[in-house]
Amino acid sequence: MLFMDWLTSVSGFVVGVIVGLTGVGGGSLMTPLLVLVFGVAPATAVGTDLLYAAITKAGGIYMHDRQGTIDYRIAGLLGLGSIPLAIVTAIALHLIAPAPDTLAAVIKTTLGGALLLTAAALIFKTRLVALSPVQHWAARKISIVTVLVGAVIGVLVTISSVGAGAVGVAALLFLYPKRPSVQIIGTDIAHAVPLTLVAGLGHASLGTVDLTLLAALLIGSIPGVMLGSALSRAVPERILRTSLAAMLVLVGAKLVS
């Protein structure tokens, strides 16, 4: 048991570093890690990971805020769409109350699909930026689309815990291609904290949060995300992004198979 707690904390640290560096990894890495390596039930993995992500990324906000790499207006627009939809989705999970096996199957399939989508967003990030037509859009249109993107992310995150990081980063790069990558990452982390907290509390009310597991993860992740955020200006993003995308393809394919 002590060995597993230690291994869980190390996993939390590694994922925390990646989250701080790239804004990606809270759900796209930790949830499949909990399911496939630690044997945690999918619903519990999602619920626990959401609260893990909220607390972990709060440390990332602190570091990015100190560096001036957060646009709170953009984060607010995303939250305007994501948080209400996260609440609605959590209520829907309560009302539908699917059987545990059915819920597990839905979460695994959604999670696998979200991971593959995330990998594609990472792989084609540069092309997405190049194809972005937003330089011809009015500011109001960009704001409206940002809110709608937030709404989609809110649903996806509440069901699978994936999307607040990678999908959010890819969407922001497409909508705001002239912003520095480090500011995109900081803004995405700032948006992810309230979203994952709301979605995580919704799962907690369903009883799908393991507090012991959560504590073990946080012991490693909080220092990890602060270290990653501090290093975010120095580490080559391309190398980390390519490695992460390859990993997500393998994990996503395994979950949907």
Image (cartoon, helix red, strand yellow):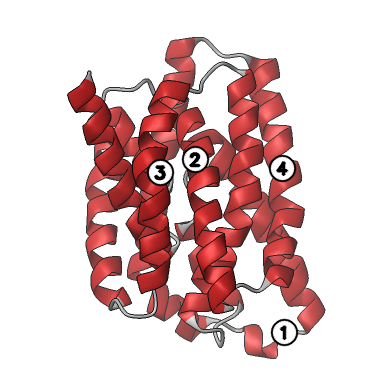
Which one is earlier in the sequence, the residue at label 1 or at label 4? 4
> Residue 40, percent across and down?
33, 22
- In the rendered view, would you say 45 is above or below 219? above
| Amino acid at circle 4 | Leu
Which one is earlier in the sequence, the residue at label 4 or at label 2? 4
Which disc is residue 137 wearing?
1
Q: Nearer the viewer, mark 3 or mark 4?
A: 4
| Amino acid at circle 1 | Trp
Which disc is residue 111 wearing?
none
State left or right for residue 43 relative to residue 144: left
Residue tagged by mark 4? 85
Q: Nearer the viewer, residue 111 or 215?
A: 215
Q: Nearer the viewer, mark 3 or mark 2?
A: 2
Which one is earlier in the sequence, the residue at label 3 or at label 2? 3
Question: Which residue: 22% across, 18% down?
Answer: 1
Q: Are marks 4 and 2 in contact (CB under 8 Å)?
A: no
Spatial separation of the CA atoms under disc 3 and disc 4: 19 Å
Characterize the local packing of mark 2: few (<14), some (14-19) or many (20 or more) Cα atoms within 10 angstroms: many
Spatial separation of the CA atoms under disc 1 and disc 4: 26 Å
| Element marked by disc 2 | loop
Q: Nearer the viewer, residue 188 or 54?
A: 54
| Element marked by disc 1 | loop
Which quarter of the figure is the C terminus placed in?
top left
* Occupied quadrant, residue 171: bottom right
Which one is earlier in the sequence, the residue at label 3 or at label 4? 4
Which disc is residue 161 wearing?
2
Residue tagged by mark 3? 113
Characterize the local packing of mark 4: few (<14), some (14-19) or many (20 or more) Cα atoms within 10 angstroms: many
| Amino acid at circle 2 | Ser
Spatial separation of the CA atoms under disc 4 and disc 2: 14 Å
